[in-house]
Structures are given as C-alpha cells and as structure tokens.
Image (spheres, coloured by chain):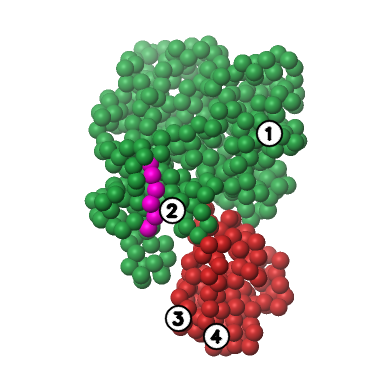
C-alpha cells in the first residue's frame, strides 16, 4: 500500500477539523466529519453542503472518434447527447463485470469529460487501452481519441477536480459568486444532468447540475486544482448566512444511502457482484443500441437474477444498535432473504440498502439479525454469517421503502 | 480534556478510584473518534472480570469500539441511563457518561494504568 495522499483541499480541511478526524478513503486522507454527521446531513437537506470530491477521477476524451469510443466503452447512449448535457452509465468488461459507474459530460461536439470513482481511477486508465483494441475493429482504423487524465500536472490549464455544492440553498450561493448576469441566467435555466462553462475567482470552470446526495438542487464544480482552495473558501464565505457547511465522508455516505444511490463495491459489483439491473439501474444500460463492450453478457444478466437492491427503514433512535453491512435481512417468517450492504442513521431512523429476494415489495415488513461483532457476542452464540434460507429471530424490524428518494 | 485525578488505559478508558471502588468510562478522545454514540452494550452486574476482559461496546453509526476492563474485580453497578441516552458519553464522558463501577482488586499500579500526564503524552505519540 502506498501512503495516503492529500487532496488539494488538505490544508482547508485542517483549518476546520482536527488531523485525527481524517481517514484514508480511496487512497486519500479525507475528513469523516467537520461538525457532526447528522448536522452536515441536515444542512444538505435544509440549506447546503460543500464536499471535497477532488479525489474523483476526471478524464478528458477528445477527437473525431470520441463519441464513437464512448458509445462502445459505456452502456449509455453517447452519440445523441447534446453538448452541455450528461449521462450516468457503466463501464463493463467483456464478461459483463462492472468496472465502474461513471458520468459522461459532453462539453463540445468532439469533447467529453468522464468522471469515475477514485478507487477505480487506475483500473479505468488501464482499461482504456484494452477497450480501444476491442473497438478498433469496429471503428475500422479511425484515429483513436485523445484521452487525458485531468488530474495530471502535464495538462496545465486544462486540469480539473470536482467540488460538490448540494442542497436547496446551493443555487443562491452560486449566484452570489458567478461573474455576470449571463452566467446567472445559465444557472437559472440549468436542468438536472446539464452543465455550462463559466468563470469563478477568475478562472475557467464547468458547473453541472449533478451530484450524489439525492438533492433536487445541487451542483458539481469542475475547477483547476490550484483554484480549488480559493473557490472552496469563497463558497463557504458566500453561503455562511444561508447555512452552508463543509461536509465530510460521513454525511456523503448517509445522504447517498437515504437517497438510495449505489456506491461501487457496495450496491454495485463488490462481493455480491451486483449488476446494474439488480441495483435498480437497468435504464442506464442501453441493450438495444448497436454495440458496447459487455453488451451480450449484460443482456443475459438483465433477466437472470433472484436478488435486488432495496432500501429499508429501521428504527434508529438512541439505544438501538446500529445495523451494519452483512447483517442478515429476514422475511416475516424469519427466513434469511439477503444482507445489508450499507446503512446510515437519519434522524430517528436507520436507512439501509440491502440485497434481498427480488420478490419482496415496497411496504413489506422485514427483520434484521445482527452478526457477532465482538468476542463477547461470539461467546453468547451470535453467528458470524447467515446463509440464504436459514431461519433466525430478528433483533429489529423494519419496512421496505421506495427504491429511490429525492429531496 | 484530560482530568488530572483519573487513570487511563492505552485503549482510551478512564478510571476513577474511590477506595477499592473503581468507576470507569471512555475518554474524551475515544468518544470524539466515534462520533455520535447511538448504542452502548453494558456488562452484566455482579460479573467477575479480569483486567483487559472485554466488558461491553460503544457504537456510533460509523464505528463500533469494544470496551475493556481497566481493572480486575467484580462489577457492582452499571450506568443504565446509557441504554436510552447513549449520547451522555458524548456530552459528559467523565461524569454522566460513566459505564460501570467495579470493586477493584488492586490500584492503578497493579494494573499499569497511566496518569493524566502519561496519557496526554501517549495521545501525542499516536
């Protein structure tokens, strides 16, 4: 393992939180929280929150064949995407294993930006070459697109990192720091999964209405890494009276769980090899387009599964033991029908994402059995894993919610 | 944040001795690392324990931390308030947030506990 890297906002984090609050996440030192997870979660639902997403991988794909390349690389329709619009989709390998979930932004007729998970950055970087080989035959010798890592210092002024400003007050906060009326107009007209280029603090940026919190109003700002600190500070200043707070990894996780959004390695791929169809994102896999890598494997997966991701609500008042990944989900009969993938406390509830029997429906009651977490639990006979079909007594009961929630 | 009249373990528990009665809990540093504490598992009263026996756990939504007994002896009392008000540990880890009382078979030296100065240095070395 290489030592944890600092994000470009490391110095900003140390101004607002203790060094001991920083943990290693996807190879980077990031704060779990600044004030508290529930306070930061609430701020995003009621006002706004600012997130350091500068660890995310940002790739540029340019050239006459860029659209065709991305059309073959991802499960989404890219050729028909208008400049200034974005789509969410998947990169899968030839046997249909999900390599990552990505957002592709079309910046111009021959220019795209693709944002990947930090944990998958290097893997995707390597996959580009293999994908190009596979697609070469189909693109019949046309020049390969130019692919650049926008974190790379060699990219100079083109370098970009991601900051996320999320929550109902985020539009007003951004308006306050946009350079002119034209930019404020563009922001006012922006719909979900659209973006526009503008300037912040004197440098070029791309602002998009995307995010990972389930907020109806929220933005991602793609800025030069040297400007990330100044823009971070300027935003916090501009939004202070509106309730804007910096948010750590804890709130990022609890917000995306509450919204039902998958995290690669948990609700997508990972130990259970969860497919986009099981995750509830079959709409982002365009099986009927002419070709993408892994298409036939995904076609088979589209109907061939018995478990899918569901969102559960469980009690979460103080004194209720937190539910954790791998805890068993039980049907009314006590039979194990799946496992918890992620869980977060939200107010007096816990919201969990779980992989469960695909026949379970919204509103149904489910139980959860806590796995042993300590030597004492093992001595008391608590199990360390539960298999499908085993019958257990539930420790806590909850219900299945709608798969997704928007705020 | 490190009261001078208490004794400390490397696992971030504190002990207050009142004769042979030892009251214990987790330190400010420990509760801060856990974040909002939502669940506390307390030991059974009257249980006989050795030093470093796991006697319970403290959990937040992000982490679970096992609690070890800093001393050997018999548990005489547990702080039942924590079952419904686990946040007392965040609010008052050295007073209202105590975990249990133990009739201890020995003093701070017996169990190799650190004094406040030693614990402070230990924290800095972490």
Local crowd size for mark 1, using a 10 Å CA cut-off: few (<14), some (14–19), many (≥20): many
Q: In what element is the residue under mark 3?
A: loop
Magenta segment includes B4: no
Seen in the image, is A310 located left or right of residue A146? left
Mark 2 or 1, nearer chain start? 1
Span colored in magenta: A395-400
Locate residue A200, reporting x and y percent: 72, 25
Tag of residue A323: 2
Circles 1 and 3 on the same subunit: no
Closest to the observer, A95 or A377: A377
Tell me whether the residue at label 2 lies in contact with that at label 4, contact meaning CB atoms closer than 8 angstroms: no
User: Which residue was labeled with disc 3?
Assistant: B47
Name above or below for residue B82 compared with residue B45.
above
From mark 1 to mark 3, how far is it between C-alphas?
56 Å
Near-viewer residue (A334 or A2): A334
Using the image, determine if residue A2 lies above or below residue A298: below
Q: Chain ID for label 2?
A: A
Q: Label 2, secondary structure: give it.
A: loop
């Amino acid at each position: 393992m290489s030592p944890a890297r600092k994000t470009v906002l490391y110095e900003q984090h140390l101004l607002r939180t203790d060094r001991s609050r920083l943990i290693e996440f996807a190879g980077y030192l990031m704060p779990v929280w600044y004030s508290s997870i529930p306070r930061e979660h609430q701020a995003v639902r009621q006002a706004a929150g600012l997130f350091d997403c500068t660890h995310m991988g940002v790739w540029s794909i340019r050239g006459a064949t860029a659209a065709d390349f991305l059309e073959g690389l991802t499960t989404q329709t890219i050729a028909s995407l208008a400049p200034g619009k974005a789509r969410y989709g998947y990169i899968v390998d030839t046997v249909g294993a999900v390599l990552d979930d990505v957002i592709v932004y079309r910046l111009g007729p021959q220019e795209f930006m693709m944002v990947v998970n930090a944990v998958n950055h290097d893997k995707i970087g390597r996959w580009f070459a293999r994908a190009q080989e596979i697609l070469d035959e189909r693109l019949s010798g046309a020049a390969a697109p130019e692919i650049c890592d926008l974190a790379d210092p060699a990219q100079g002024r083109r370098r970009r990192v991601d900051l996320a400003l999320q929550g109902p007050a985020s539009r007003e906060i951004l308006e306050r720091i946009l350079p002119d009326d034209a930019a404020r107009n563009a922001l006012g007209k922006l719909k979900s999964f659209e973006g526009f280029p503008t300037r912040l603090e004197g440098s070029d940026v791309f602002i998009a209405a995307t995010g990972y919190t389930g907020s109806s109003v929220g933005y991602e700002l793609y800025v030069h890494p040297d400007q990330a600190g100044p823009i971070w500070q300027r935003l916090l200043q501009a939004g202070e009276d509106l309730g804007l707070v910096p948010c750590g990894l804890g709130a990022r996780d609890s917000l995306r769980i509450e919204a039902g959004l998958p995290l690669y390695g948990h609700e997508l791929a990972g130990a259970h090899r969860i497919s986009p169809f099981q995750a509830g994102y079959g709409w982002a896999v365009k099986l009927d387009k002419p070709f993408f890598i892994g298409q036939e494997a995904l076609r088979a997966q589209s109907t061939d599964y018995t478990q899918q991701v569901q969102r559960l609500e469980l009690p979460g008042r103080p004194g209720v033991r937190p539910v954790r990944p791998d805890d068993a989900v039980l049907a009314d009969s006590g039979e194990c029908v799946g496992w918890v993938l992620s869980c977060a406390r939200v107010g007096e509830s816990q919201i969990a994402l779980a992989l469960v029997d695909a026949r379970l429906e919204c509103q149904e009651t489910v139980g959860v059995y806590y796995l042993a977490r300590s030597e004492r639990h093992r001595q008391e006979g608590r199990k360390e894993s539960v298999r499908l079909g085993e019958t257990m007594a539930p420790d806590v009961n909850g219900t299945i919610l709608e798969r997704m929630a928007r705020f | 944040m490190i009261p001078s009249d208490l004794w400390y373990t490397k696992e971030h528990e504190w002990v207050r001795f009142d004769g042979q009665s030892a009251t214990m809990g987790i330190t400010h540093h420990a509760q801060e690392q856990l974040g909002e504490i939502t669940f506390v598992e307390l030991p059974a009263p009257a249980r006989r324990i050795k030093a470093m026996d796991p006697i319970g756990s403290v959990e937040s939504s992000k982490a679970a931390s096992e609690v070890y007994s800093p001393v050997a002896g018999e548990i005489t009392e547990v702080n039942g308030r924590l079952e419904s008000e686990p946040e007392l540990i965040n609010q008052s880890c050295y007073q209202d947030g105590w975990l249990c009382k133990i009739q201890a078979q020995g003093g701070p030296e017996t169990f190799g506990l650190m004094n406040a100065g030693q614990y402070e240095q230990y924290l800095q070395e972490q």
